[in-house]
């Protein structure tokens, strides 16, 4: 098992990064330090880790605010904390935003990843035991028809500015391994859901709109398919890769859990209605079919047999249980919801989504 001492986590104030940091710092088998580097864009919320900051702040947990595009800052962090492992989550992550404004995606996802890789290459020259793990998405593989799966060797075919920027970052990661020998691993994961997800993404957006009696915007015919994975199962997959993964390898991670959007929405309505004491029919009446997302990928489905076979990873949270926990969490955290909505997010929905 690889030992991790000084872990640089980028984007640790976001959805998956904050869940990852909480799990690691409360896990007996991890005894290292975590340095969370985050620019605190609209998607980064320090409240997501206030419990962790209280328990571990300036002992085993350190927060550094800054951008992955800022080379001098990244270099300083590498030397200040003697970083031996990078877990790179930081990204612009929302497909709709990439359609409205691709530039930030190219800057952060492409240039930011390049900057991190290049600093790591220089800082780690002739150093053993180091690893750069890059978190990526199944969207780099494009869109599937009714059948078939994405495998690790499926050719890349990104179709949105978001997925093109992630594909580009994946290629850079592989190029740094092949050209400079940088020890890397890469994971391509399907749709995550769970606590601390920003309410622009399908599941939290729908949960909050239901509670607030707002329309439920379904893109196109509602029959696009996504493969859903509970966020803590993604975290356990990343842990397996960090500790047991082979350098230079990529691993697909997925839920093996495909749902048409409209079918998922109807299931969610049942859960929210029951938990929030609302009438199912009243919520159903708010389903609103809206203009489709341009270039909307039809279906994603991950084959994750490699990580299961080679690293012994397994999903552990069933969808019913995961959805239940997620709805409970959003119902119990109005404080977090108010906080995350108080920033730029408000301006963004006002400017771009008033017609929906
Ligand atoms: P998120 O949008 O919730 O969080 C992104 C975080 O990155 C935020 O805290 C933000 O402040 C930070 N950030 C953005 N630009 C930055 C910059 N220039 N410098 C430093 N920090 C910056 O994203 P997420 O959903 O947690 O996704 C994390 C990673 O996982 C991304 O790389 C994404 O592509 C990938 N991924 C996400 C999913 C999913 O379903 N959410 C699935 C597969 C892969
Ligand atoms: O597949 C992994 C990807 O999953 C990650 O790489 C991305 O970071 C993450 O955002 C997610 O991308 P999607 O585009 O699949 O997720 P989103 O939650 O935006 O949408 C899920 C599906 O629901 C998609 O088919 C679009 C649809 N949708 C979405 C929203 C926000 C709607 O019908 N209505 C909506 O309001």
Image (cartoon, rainbow, N blue to C red):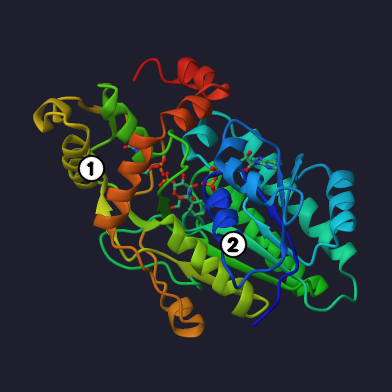
Q: Categorize mark 2 by other alpha carbons within 10 Å: few (<14), some (14-19), many (20+).
A: some
Left or right of 206 on screen, residue 128:
right
Whether residue 245 appears in this view of the structure is no
For the residue carrying disc 1, how many other residues have a C-alpha within 10 Å: few (<14), some (14-19), or many (20+)?
many
Residue 133 rendering spot, x and y as whole percentages? 66, 65
Q: Which residue is at 47% across, 58% downward?
A: 138
Q: Position of residue 196 (x, y in %)?
A: 47, 42
Identify the image quadrant of residue 272: top left
Give the x, y percent position of residue 129: 78, 77
How many discs appear?
A: 2
Q: Nearer the viewer, residue 277 or 160?
A: 277
Q: Identify which residue is drawn at 47% across, 37% down.
A: 198
Relative side of 243 to 65, left or right: left
Q: Quadrant of residue 314?
A: bottom left
What kind of element bears circle 1? helix
Q: Could one spot residue 256 in this view of the protein?
A: yes
| Disc 2 + disc 1, Cβ < 8 Å | no
Residue 298 in the image: above or below residue 336: below
Q: Is residue 294 left or right of residue 6?
A: left
Residue in the picture at 78% in, 54% down: 116
Q: Please, which residue is most extreme toward the front here?
A: 55
Query: Which residue is identified by label 2?
Result: 24
Label whose residue precedes the other's in the sequence (2 or 1): 2
Q: Is residue 93 above or below residue 29?
A: above
């Amino acid at each position: 098992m690889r030992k991790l001492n000084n872990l640089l986590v980028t984007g640790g104030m976001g959805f998956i990064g904050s869940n990852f940091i909480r799990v690691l710092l409360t896990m007996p088998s991890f005894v290292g330090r975590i340095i969370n580097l985050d620019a605190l864009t609209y998607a980064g919320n320090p409240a997501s880790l206030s419990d962790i900051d209280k328990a571990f702040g300036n002992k085993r947990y350190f927060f550094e605010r800054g951008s992955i595009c800022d080379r001098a800052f990244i270099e300083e962090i590498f030397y200040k904390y003697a970083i031996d492992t990078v877990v790179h989550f930081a990204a612009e992550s929302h497909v709709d935003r990439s359609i409205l404004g691709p530039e930030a995606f190219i800057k952060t996802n492409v240039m930011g990843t390049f900057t991190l890789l290049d600093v790591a290459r220089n800082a780690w020259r002739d150093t053993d035991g180091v690893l750069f793990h890059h978190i990526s998405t199944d969207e780099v593989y494009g869109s599937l028809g009714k059948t078939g799966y994405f495998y690790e060797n499926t050719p890349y075919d990104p179709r949105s500015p978001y997925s093109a920027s992630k594909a580009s970052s994946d290629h850079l990661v592989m190029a740094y391994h092949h050209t400079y020998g940088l020890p890397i691993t890469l994971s391509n994961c399907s749709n995550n859901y769970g606590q601390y997800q920003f309410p622009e993404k399908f599941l939290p957006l729908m949960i909050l709109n239901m509670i607030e009696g707002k329309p439920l915007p379904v893109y196109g015919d509602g029959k696009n398919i996504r493969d859903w994975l509970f966020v803590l199962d993604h975290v356990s997959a990343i842990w397996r890769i960090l500790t047991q993964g082979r350098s230079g390898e990529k691993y697909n991670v997925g839920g093996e859990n495909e749902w048409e959007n409209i079918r998922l929405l109807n299931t969610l309505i049942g859960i929210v209605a029951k938990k929030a004491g609302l009438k199912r029919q009243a919520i159903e009446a708010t389903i609103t079919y809206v203009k489709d997302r341009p270039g909307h990928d039809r279906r994603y489905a991950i084959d994750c047999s490699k990580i299961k076979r080679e690293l012994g990873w397994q999903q552990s949270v069933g969808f019913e249980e995961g959805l239940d926990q997620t709805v409970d969490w959003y119902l119990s955290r109005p404080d977090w919801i108010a906080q995350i909505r108080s920033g730029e997010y408000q301006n963004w929905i006002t400017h771009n989504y008033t017609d929906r």
